[in-house]
Image (spheres, helix red, strand yellow):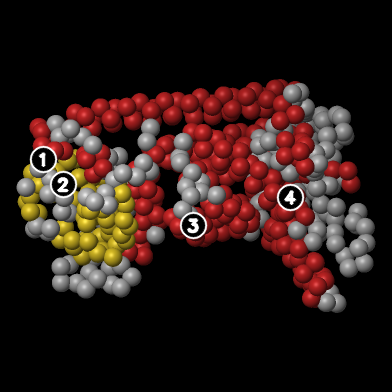
């Protein structure tokens, strides 16, 4: 295959793989709901939590539509002026997938440890339940954060189509790991991000906080010391639960908290630290609240 | 570590569905790759078959001007095909920047190859839209002229070939090319799909 055909292939299968993952995501959700009904866990509150998870997709896709064009333009603009271009081959596509997963790890780490990005990512973690509907719980600002962190891949000289498909693959992989149905998977737990590892990531228990950031692979967590084994079933949600299923409050609950902190800050240095340090940071460096 | 209580049958279905999902995805990726590979081989065969003298037509063109974006390339560059491909992608991504007030066809795009320099092994490629001959090209656009004359025309319906493929074909010397202003042209529909492609080589 020549370059043009390879790019057409990757563009074609990238979107198709995501579509298939969505179809199976719908099947997993139906099974989750059936299980909740049979095990008598489905009450009004639980149903509203599932609905709140799914309705975040509406503003997310609206923003995605708005910024996607700008993101594509930026990507091709950078790529056009980069003198060093990495040839489009199957090998470079596999490399991009690996680097996209590493980029996701970095993005995810920053989304937890930098409050400005936590504004968006906290929406995903605010769900007190853990099923596939949680996988669909996004902030409307997530596309912007994701676009920002993938710019270095274009600067490295990878073709934008390959980078887009790497991003899509990393996102599509994570639909199936949001569940409490699947236990540990033996040797797969050493390399891949699994339901067990991702339950830890969503846990608000002290030992589970800011752990297991991986997308497809768990190896970056093992290498950089952010890995935590699942020892008992986590408590999901935030350390301070939001206790609401109102779609507007779900999207924006963190904003008034941040604005209040910025307003009350004594100096510009403290305001900058509120924005760029961890969500738990206080000027007196108080311990994290439970 | 104990998971919450689940209906055993539902849990079994869930597990089977996950395995099925990965099996389908891996099969689909592999199947599509084989399909594109076989398509590529068929396309190469088609190129060999359709560059015979029986499969090109000769037309007379009155000549025209296009306005868009230019870049200088070398036919000795090993990455020429990729650079041309990237040039097209960049143009399509920002096509509305190259609309001219004098555009005569909004649904047909051209790439003109001119300014051949045998010493430098270079040529200029300009992608753009046809404009009226009397229109002054806007400052932010670059123009290229297709000279009036005779052109050998090859079908390129799906846009998978370019003039550079014809250059390396056995038929090329037999065409008596002029090396003046060769061009490719493609029509696209409202969804941006390309069709009705043609490659035109200026001949004596």
Q: CA distance from mark 2 to mark 4?
A: 55 Å
**Residue furthest out toward the front:** B119
Label 4, secondary structure: give it. helix
Q: CA distance from mark 2 to mark 3?
A: 33 Å
List the residue tagged with mark 1.
B175
Label 1 resides on the chain identified as B
Taking the image as drawn, is residue B168 in sight? yes
Is label 4 or label 1 in front? 1
Q: CA distance from mark 4 to mark 1?
A: 61 Å
Q: CA distance from mark 4 to mark 3?
A: 25 Å
**Residue at 21% across, 29% down:** B48
The circle drawn on residue B201 is 2
**Residue at 42% across, 25% down:** B34
List the residue tagged with mark 4.
A109
List the residue tagged with mark 3.
A78
Q: Earlier in the sequence, mark 1 or mark 2?
A: 1
B159 relative to A193 in the view: left or right: left
Q: CA distance from mark 3 to mark 1?
A: 40 Å
> Marks 2 and 1: in contact by CB < 8 Å?
yes
The quadrant in which the C terminus of chain A is found is bottom right
Q: State the image coordinates of residue B2 (x, y, percent, origin top left).
A: 85, 29
The quadrant in which the N terminus of chain A is found is top left
């Amino acid at each position: 295959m020549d370059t043009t055909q390879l790019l057409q292939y990757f563009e074609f299968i990238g979107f198709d793989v995501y579509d298939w993952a969505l179809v199976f995501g719908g099947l997993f959700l139906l099974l989750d709901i059936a299980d909740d009904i049979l095990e008598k866990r489905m009450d009004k509150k639980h149903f509203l939590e599932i609905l709140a998870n799914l309705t975040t997709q509406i503003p997310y896709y609206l923003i995605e539509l708005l910024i996607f064009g700008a993101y594509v333009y930026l990507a091709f603009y950078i790529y056009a002026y980069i003198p060093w271009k990495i040839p489009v081959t199957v090998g470079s596509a596999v490399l991009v997938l690996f680097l996209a997963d590493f980029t996701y790890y970095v993005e995810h780490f920053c989304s937890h440890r930098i409050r400005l990005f936590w504004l968006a990512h906290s929406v995903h973690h605010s769900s007190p339940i853990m099923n596939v509907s949680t996988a669909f719980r996004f902030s409307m600002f997530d596309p912007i954060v994701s676009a920002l962190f993938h710019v270095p891949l274009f600067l490295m000289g990878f073709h934008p189509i390959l980078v887009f498909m790497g991003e899509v693959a990393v996102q599509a992989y994570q639909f199936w790991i949001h569940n409490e149905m699947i236990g540990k998977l033996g040797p797969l737990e050493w390399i891949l991000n699994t339901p067990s590892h991702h339950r830890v990531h969503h846990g608000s228990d002290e030992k589970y906080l800011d752990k297991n950031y991986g997308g497809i692979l768990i190896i970056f967590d093992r290498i950089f010391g952010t890995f935590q084994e699942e020892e008992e079933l986590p408590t999901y949600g935030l350390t301070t639960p939001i206790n609401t299923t109102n779609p507007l409050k779900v999207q924006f609950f963190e904003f008034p908290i941040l604005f209040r902190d910025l307003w009350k800050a004594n100096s510009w240095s403290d305001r900058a630290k509120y924005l760029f340090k961890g969500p738990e940071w206080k000027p007196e460096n108080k311990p994290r609240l439970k | 570590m104990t998971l919450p209580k689940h209906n055993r049958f539902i849990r079994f279905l869930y597990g089977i569905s996950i395995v099925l999902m990965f099996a389908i995805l891996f099969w689909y990726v592999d199947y599509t790759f084989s399909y594109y590979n076989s398509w590529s081989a068929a396309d190469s065969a088609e190129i060999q078959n359709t560059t015979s003298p029986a499969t090109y037509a000769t037309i007379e063109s009155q000549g025209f001007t296009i306005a868009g974006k230019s870049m200088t390339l070398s036919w000795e560059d090993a990455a020429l095909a990729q650079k041309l491909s990237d040039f097209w992608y960049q143009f399509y991504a920002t096509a509305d920047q190259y609309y001219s007030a004098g555009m005569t066809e909004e649904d047909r795009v051209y790439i003109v190859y001119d300014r051949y320099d045998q010493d430098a092994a270079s040529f200029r490629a300009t992608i753009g839209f046809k404009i009226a001959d009397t229109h002054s090209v806007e400052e932010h656009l670059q123009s290229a002229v297709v000279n009036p004359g005779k052109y050998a025309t090859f079908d390129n319906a799906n846009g998978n070939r370019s003039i550079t493929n014809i250059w390396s074909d056995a038929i090329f010397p037999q065409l008596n090319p002029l090396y003046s202003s060769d061009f490719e042209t493609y029509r696209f529909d409202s969804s941006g799909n390309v069709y009705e492609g043609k490659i035109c080589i200026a001949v004596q």
